[in-house]
Image: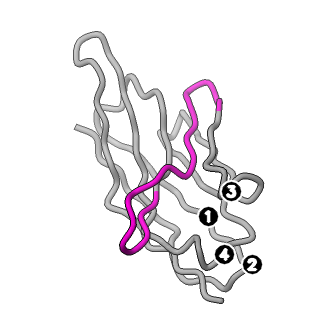
Amino acid sequence: QVQLVESGGGLVQAGGSLRLSCAASGSTFGTTIMGWYRQAPGKERELVATITSGGSTNYADSVKGRFTVSRDNAKNSVYLQMNSLKPGDTAVYYCKITLWTWLEGTREYWGQGTHVTVSS
């Protein structure tokens, strides 16, 4: 089992910044992709940004140039630096980790979510 603990959400004014953190613990051997997703009220969960174990990143078009995803493999942690926040970024942000091993195959785990509210 893997446990994910997120932190860093909160209320910020438009144009401001927040940094989300997600720390994984437990059976984290085989971690491949770590990333962030978000779900706004009444909308489906969507990808925000992902990063592979080698450092390759992928971003949603809506956050490119404003958000930066990073990870610390030694700490089994992933981060999301969010700048120039807009009211449209308001959502619950979820951390996700994907692992793969020969023995267990692919496993995915989600964090509990952290609220981000951007006021205009």
Q: Say what amino acid the circle numbered 4 marks.
A: Lys
**Residue at which label 1 appears:** 19
Q: Is residue 10 magenta?
A: no
Would you name the residue on which mark 2 appears?
A: 15
In the image, residue 119 sits, relative to residue 95, either above or below, namely below
Q: Earlier in the sequence, mark 1 or mark 4?
A: 1
- Judge by depth and name the residue closer to the eye, 26 or 17: 17
Q: Nearer the viewer, residue 118 or 27?
A: 118
Q: Is residue 69 above or below residue 120?
A: above
**How far apart are labels 1 and 3 at the CA level?**
9 Å
**Percent of width and height locating residue 14:** 69, 82
Which quadrant of the structure image shows residue 94? bottom left
Q: Amino acid at mark 3?
A: Phe
Eye-nearest disc, 1 or 2:
2
Mark 1: amino acid: Arg
Relative image position of residue 18 (x, y in whole percent): 63, 70
Q: CA distance from mark 1 to mark 2?
A: 14 Å
Q: Secondary structure at mark 3?
A: strand
Q: Which mark is residue 86?
A: 4
Residue visible at 52% across and 80% down in the picture: 117
> Which is more toward the observer, 76 or 106?
106
Question: Image quarter for residue 59?
Answer: top right
Choose mark 1 or mark 3, whichever is in front.
3
- The structure residue drawn at horizontal position 36% and vertical position 72%, both measured from the top left corner, is 42
Say which quadrant the N terminus sits in. top left
User: Which quarter shows the C terminus?
Assistant: bottom right
Work out whether mark 2 precedes mark 3 in sequence or the reverse, and give the earlier one: 2
